[in-house]
Amino acid sequence: GNSRQAFDRDLNNFQPRAGLAVLGEDLTVRVWNDLAVDMWGVRTDEVAGRPFAELDIGMPVDELVATVRDVLARPGDPRVSRELVVPAVNRKGRRFQCRVVVSRLAMDSGIPNGVCVLMEHLAARAEPGS
């Protein structure tokens, strides 16, 4: 109903510079925000309900699945999160470092045992001496 739409809207407003995927306990994609679409060139309707591990995006998804499972394996700690930086290729074929933060969703989110995956384009650091 309305609370679900409000939840989706809030998620889309959250972390405006980051792509966001929300996964259910079964690791299927429940939410995929506009920045994730823009980052990977994969539309929401192409990923909704699909296993995260099967997504064809420019990122080592299998490495991320292990991290998601690790976060899910700690139900006693709602604040648990993991952060990693992985090599990625955006939809335009540009290589970049992607900062990924995996955290549990709040229990009242409407997605029990859900996991939030934030994907952020790290700014290229200037090379020393350039």
Image (cartoon, rainbow, N blue to C red):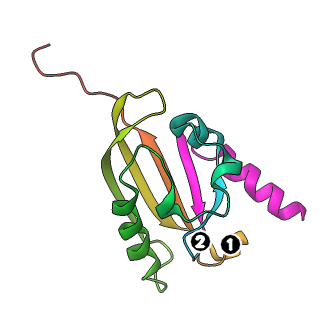
Asked whether residue 7 is drawn in magenta, I would say yes
Callout 2: SS? loop
Residue located 40% across and 52% down the image: 100
Left or right: 76, with 20 as reference point: left
Callout 1: SS? loop
Q: Amino acid at mark 1?
A: Ile
Q: Are marks 2 and 1 in contact (CB under 8 Å)?
A: yes
User: Can you tell which mark lies on residue 114?
Assistant: 2
Residue located 75% across and 58% down the image: 7
User: Can you tell which mark lies on residue 111?
Assistant: 1
Q: Amino acid at mark 2?
A: Gly
Q: Residue 18, position in %: x, y?
A: 52, 42
The segment highlighted magenta reads: 1-23
* Label 1 packing within 10 angstroms: few (<14), some (14-19), many (20+): some
Residue 124: quarter of image? top left
Q: Residue 8, position in %: x, y?
A: 74, 55
Q: Nearer the viewer, residue 44 or 105?
A: 44
What is the distance, in whole Å, between disc 2 and disc 1 at their CAs?
A: 5 Å
